Image: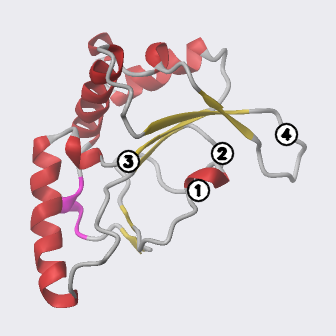
Amino acid sequence: MFKGLLPAHFPTAQEVFEALLVCGERYRAGDFKQFIRIYVEHEYEPGQVPEYSALYSLSRYLPYAEDNTLEGYEARVTRLLKGRRFGVVLNNLQTYHWHHWLQMKTFLSGFYEAMGVPLSGADSTLFLGNYRSTPSVCTRTTCTSSTSSSKGGRR
């Protein structure tokens, strides 16, 4: 993992919110092919890793324009879940926000020129939420990862 690599090539918190909003609008319009998952953290024993379950009816847990910001979105979902912690994972973030697609294209063009194009392609994946640890089902991958944090940090 390359942490905080070239922050200019990663979306701001507002751009992340805008991308999630587009995903939510598409989902509510009936396009269920979005690569988004929402996990809810369950109580756990002290010293143990939290357990998660996935939500399958996502509509009310996705952003609305009225949320205004990532903080507003997180607060609303936390209220919906009665204080339980949650995580949102969205693959192909670049397909929901034009500016981020340009950022990714600029970053990867130099990388591909120097290293070659990976057979598995490239994907900008968003991990968002107030979870204590990333749900283990989210992080199994054969891809190299680069992370950037617009708020908080990886735990």
Residue 4 position by quadrant = bottom left
Asked which secondary structure carries label 3, the reply is loop
Marks 3 and 2, the one that precedes in the sequence: 3
Asked which secondary structure carries label 4, the reply is loop
Q: Which residue is mark 1?
A: 155
Residue 9 spot, x, y in % from top left: 18, 61
Q: Is residue 10 left or right of residue 127?
A: left
Marks 2 and 1, the one that precedes in the sequence: 2
Kind of residue at badge 2 = Arg
Residue 92 spot, x, y in % from top left: 31, 49
Q: Judge whether 99 appears above or below 129 on screen.
A: below
Q: Judge whether 59 appears above or below 56 on screen.
A: above
Q: Quadrant of the C terminus?
A: bottom right
Q: Which mark is residue 98?
A: none
Kind of residue at badge 4 = Tyr
Marks 3 and 1, the one that precedes in the sequence: 3
Marks 4 and 1, the one that precedes in the sequence: 4
C-beta proximity under 8 Å, tags 2 and 1: yes
Front residue of 13 and 19: 19
Name the residue rendered at 38%, 54% in the picture.
149
Q: Residues within 10 Å of mark 4 (few under 14, many from 20)?
A: few
C-beta proximity under 8 Å, tags 4 and 2: no
